[in-house]
Amino acid sequence: MTERQNLLESIATTIKTYRKGELPEPTAQHVDRWVSQFTPGNQLAFLREFDHVMKSQFITKKLVKSFLRNLITNEKLSGTDPKSYWLKANVLDIQQDGQSQSAMVDIFDKLLQEELGISLAECGQEDSNFIYLDDVIFSGGRIGTDLGDWIRKSAPAKASVQVIVIAWHTLGRFHLGKNLGTAVTESQKKIDFTYWRLAEIENRKSYKNSSEVLWPIEAPNVKVVNDYLALPHKFPFDPRTPGAARDPFSSEAGRQILEREFVIAGAQIRSQGQVADVNRPLGHGFFGLGFGATVVTYRNCPNNCPLALWWGNPDEVSGALKWYPLLARKNYSSPENVFGKFFK
C-alpha cells in the first residue's frame, strides 16, 4: 500500500463517526476525491499534516462522554455528595440555533442515570446552580446570545452559572466573558460564572505568533488569493511570524502547507460567487483570512473551519457549490435544527 493510500485510510478512520447515521461512513475514496481538488504537487504533504491534525482535533462522542462523566463526580464542581448537587442543579436547554446543546444535555442525562441513578427530569431547584452545556466556544457569539437573553429575561435576581464546554478558543472566551458581564450589569442582577473546559486553543491576535489555529505567515501569491485580498476588508490579513511547531501541528512546514492550500482552495470557492462575505477562506469570521479553526465534532463541522473542509455539494456541477466537501455540515436552517427543538 502506498503512503498516500495509507494516509487516506487513516483520515477516513479518524472521521468515521462524523454525522453517523446521517451521512455514509467516510471511506478512503471519499477522502481522495476531496483532496484531489488541491494543488497536485502538494497533496501528499497536505495529507500527512491533515492526518496528524485530525487525530487530535476530531472530537468523538466517546471523548465527550468521558469528559462529562468525569465532571459529574468532580469534587471541585459537585462536592463530596454529587447526587445531592445534581438533584438541585438546573441544567439549561436554551440554545436558539442548532442542536449541539440539546445533544450534550441528552448525553449528560444518560450519564447521570448511569453514574448516580438519577435523571434530569428529577433535577432542578430554586436558588441552586445553573448549568450551561455546549461543545466548543469559537467566537463566543452563540453562547453569548443564549445566556445574554436568559440573563435579561429568565434568570433569577441572583445566580451562579457553570459554563461547561469541551474546548474554547481564547478570543471567543474573552469576548464571551465581556459580553456576559455587560448583560449582567444591564440586568442589575447578581450572576457569576465559572467556566470548565477540557482544552484551550490560543487564537488572540496579540498572540498570533504562538496561535494554535490556521494563521498563515503570508498570503499565497496566486491570482485568486490576490483578487480576494484586493477586496475591502475592515480587518485585513495580519500574518504571523513563523516559529517552533505548536499543537495541533506536527511542524512549522506542515502547518504552512495546510494554511497555504486551505487559503487557495477557499479563495477559489469564493471566486465562484454564492458565498457570504463573512465566510472567508479559512472559515467564518470577521478578520484576516478567516477564523482558521481545526476542531471538528462528530456531530458537525463548524463554519469557523476552512471553507474547503465543509463547503459544497457532491451533486453540483457548476458554481461555488461544485466543490466536493470532506465534512458536509448541517446549517442552522437544516430541517433537524429548525424543527428539532420542537419535536424532540
Image (cartoon, helix red, strand yellow):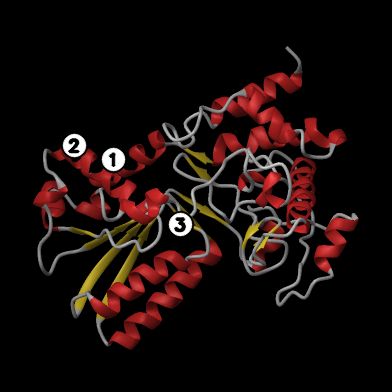
Q: Position of residue 55 (x, y in %)?
A: 57, 34
Q: Which mark is residue 115?
A: 2
Q: Is residue 342 above or below residue 155?
A: above
> Is 60 on the left or on the right of 68, as rendered?
right
Foreground residue among 166 and 220? 220
Q: Position of residue 53 (x, y in %)?
A: 63, 39
Say which label, 2 or 3, has the lower sequence index.
2
Dot 2, how many residues are within 10 Å of its Cα: few (below 14), some (14-19), or many (20+)? some
**Dot 1 amino acid type:** Arg
Dot 1, how many residues are within 10 Å of its Cα: few (below 14), some (14-19), or many (20+)? some
Q: Position of residue 36 (x, y in %)?
A: 76, 33
**Dot 2 amino acid type:** Glu
Q: Residue at point 77% right, 38% down?
A: 37
Q: Which mark is residue 332?
A: 3
**Dot 3 amino acid type:** Tyr
> Is 248 on the left or on the right of 317, as rendered?
left
Q: Is residue 210 above or below residue 53?
A: below
Among the 4 quarters of the image, the one containing residue 116: top left
Label 3 sits on a secondary structure element that is loop
Label 1 sits on a secondary structure element that is helix
Q: Are marks 1 and 3 in contact (CB under 8 Å)?
A: no
Q: Is residue 222 above or below residue 250?
A: below
Q: Which residue is mark 1?
A: 69
Foreground residue among 214 and 202? 214
Q: Are marks 2 and 3 in contact (CB under 8 Å)?
A: no
State the residue lying farthest toward the top.
1
